[in-house]
Amino acid sequence: MGFLTLPAVIVIIMLPGFTSADTLADFGRFAAAEGDEVAVVDMFGAERLGRIVAATDTNVTMGFGAGTHTFARADVLKADRLRDSNLDGLLKGVAVGALVGWMAAMELGAAHGFSGSIAVYGSIGLLLDNASKNREPLYRTKP
């Protein structure tokens, strides 16, 4: 059973997170992402990569190299952060480490490896999540 643990950790950590459609339809999420690198797809289907400079409930201003461009809410179809947070990978690794440590403690009758298991699997989760190039959905228009 223990030989399946590491592959299970890898699969769990690589799974993308879930954000509801109602949450993604909130244009105000751009304000929380100021300074982040994002990919915006406009109403014509063109993708623009840049950094969010400023955001309000009606528009978002992005910096591209030497200039900036302001997108109105009606012009944005979707937006993604280019990198997702590493916190979810760490938390998933810690959860798996706690489970593995608990199972080992139950089998061996000692809890001395519990914290070590949490630290090792948490580190593995953090490293694997840092290595993945998943985009994090930031905004989606409602169909």
Image (cartoon, rainbow, N blue to C red):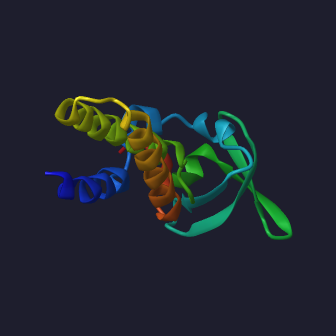
Residue reaching furthest right? 66
Q: Which of 122 and 135 is in front in this view?
A: 122
User: Which residue occupies 56% across, 57% down?
Assistant: 83
Residue displayed at 53% across by 54% down? 80
Q: Is residue 54 above or below residue 6?
A: above
What percent of the width, then of the height, locates residue 137? 47, 49
The residue that appears at 58% across and 53% down in the rendered structure is: 75
One can see residue 5 in this view: yes
Closest to the observer, 49 or 105: 105
Is residue 67 toward the left or the right of residue 136 in the image? Answer: right
Task: Tell me residue 67's x, y (percent).
Answer: 84, 65
Quadrant (top left, top right, bottom left, bottom right) of the C terminus: top left
Q: Place residue 62 in its image quadrant.
A: bottom right
Q: Which residue occupies the foreground of this view, 17 or 132? A: 132
How far across and down, in percent of the image, does residue 138 sit? 52, 46
Q: Can residue 139 be seen in this view?
A: no
Q: Who is closer to the viewer here, 143 or 115?
A: 115
Compared with 123, 132 (above or below) is below
Q: Residue at x 53, y 49 (%)?
A: 86
Q: Where is residue 38 drawn, in percent x and y? A: 62, 57
